Amino acid sequence: MDVLANPPAVKNRDLAVGSARLQEVQKAVHYYVDNHHCDVIGRVFHGIPGREASVSLSPTRREAASRGRREVLHFGSYNYSGLNGHPRVMAAAEAALKRYGTTVSGVRLLNGTCELHLELERALAEFLGFEDCITYSSGYAANLSVLSALCGEGDVVLSDMLNHQSIIDGLKLSGADVRTFRHKSLRSIESALKKLPREQRKFIITDGVFSMDGDVADLPGIVALAEEHNAFVLVDDAHATAAMGPNGRGTPAHFALQHGVDVLTGSLSKGLPGIGGFAAGSKATVDLLRFGSNGYIFSASLPPPVAAGLLEGIRILQEQPELQQRLHHNENVLRAGIRAMGLDCMNSESPIIPVLMPAYEKTFELTRLLHEEGIYVNPVGYPAVSKNRTRLRINVSANLTPADLDRFLDTLERCSRKLGLQGLDLARTGT
Ligand SMILES: Cc1ncc(COP(=O)(O)O)c(C=O)c1O
């Protein structure tokens, strides 16, 4: 029988049978689909997503990808520094595309290195204030690779309870003894450290900027405790690179504490206009990672056009400190305006501004209303945050104008009033 002409019938076996975990996932699928919440998660973007974007509601199986298409102001992008689509970044990527093609078709240690990879790692190390730097295919891969390479059985790792999933997954792979500490609690870290012998290999791991709450790690306190108790410090700066510190050099530079951070990981797809992840540290540590971390050894290198765009992005950040100044001005204006409406931005102190909501349904309703009014924001709920901490998450960009901020605040004010959201006392039951 000709298999191509007569493909065998799909068996449609249910993979959730016998798995409590997958049955929970199935329940979530039904919740999103049956309530039409899928409209506003996974919306479709047309063209370059900059300050403005053209966005459709998520396509259903029967409807076209242009359903509910709107021209929107973008308040949900990780494009903190506004460099996505920058003419210089685009020109650099285009030139590299012509010269090197779309991929090097290999891993770094074999045939996957071109000059751009070396230049990018040198530029990142210098920009972030570390001796050396290594790149990975994503920030997620960087955390998985670094933690599984550097931490292992017999090590104790103290990890903030709100650290990103990539840290949680990387630590599972590492086999280390992981002890979660209360969010940003130095007391909780200290009490754990005091119970450990000085010679015990131990790590303190924290996000630099917390991706859901938008607050910043107490790095001075962590570094001081680490020094006192002989612990290594690892910081994930995914949402701080090109979004925090002088010229966007990140959380350690913000506190002038690069010397106190043993390894800084991060993403190349947020404040920086590309894709990929990195780990920065001493030359000796980065050498350990080049020869001992699986995401580097067993996964393909960054596409050269992406590396070239990133290099140009770093040059622009170094030349134009005003980009970061505008970013922080924008975030301050938005936070003050949102708080003045009686909405709760939690302890945000970065370009990530959560707006706490009373229920997931309301979050979706508000997101949809804002979409109709030409404003893009993301709804966030469980499992990204705990069930009673559902929220809108606003991501601010340097490229938003004063008129954009006014329009956003005016629209949010009208929509949130319509839904009766202002001045609610959303009891803080812990994050
Ligand atoms: C704190 C944190 N770390 C790591 C990552 C993963 O980065 P990437 O998207 O480059 O894989 C993210 C992604 O949003 C993040 O928020």
Image (tube, rainbow, N blue to C red):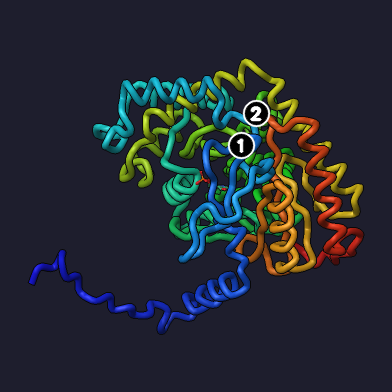
Foreground residue, 139 or 264? 139
Foreground residue, 234 or 227? 234
Q: How many marks?
A: 2
Q: From the viewer's perspective, is the residue at label 2 or at label 1 nearer?
A: 1
Identify the residue at horizontal 56%, vertical 25% (top origin).
Answer: 86
> Residue 357: x, y in percent?
78, 62
> Residue 12: x, y in percent?
33, 78
**In what quadrant of the picture does the N terminus appear?**
bottom left
Q: Mark 1 points at which residue?
A: 79
Three-letter residue code for mark 1: Asn
User: Taking 119 as reference, is 53 left or right?
Assistant: right
Identify the residue at horizontal 58%, vertical 64% (top origin).
Answer: 38
For marks 2 and 1, give the CA distance. Answer: 12 Å
**Secondary structure state at the residue bearing disc 1:** loop
Q: Mark 2 points at which residue?
A: 248
Q: Residue furthest top?
A: 319
Is residue 361 visible in the rendered structure shown here?
yes
Foreground residue, 305 or 383? 305
Q: In which quarter of the image is residue 72?
A: top right
Q: Which of marks 2 and 1 is nearer the N terminus?
A: 1
Q: In which quarter of the image is residue 325?
A: top right
| Residues packed near mark 1 inside 10 Å, few (<14), some (14 to 19) or many (20 plus) | many
The answer to whether 261 is drawn above or below residue 380 in the figure is above
The answer to whether 83 is drawn above or below residue 192 in the figure is above
Q: In which quarter of the image is residue 397?
A: top right
Identify the residue at horizontal 62%, vertical 15% (top origin).
Answer: 319
Foreground residue, 12 or 173? 12
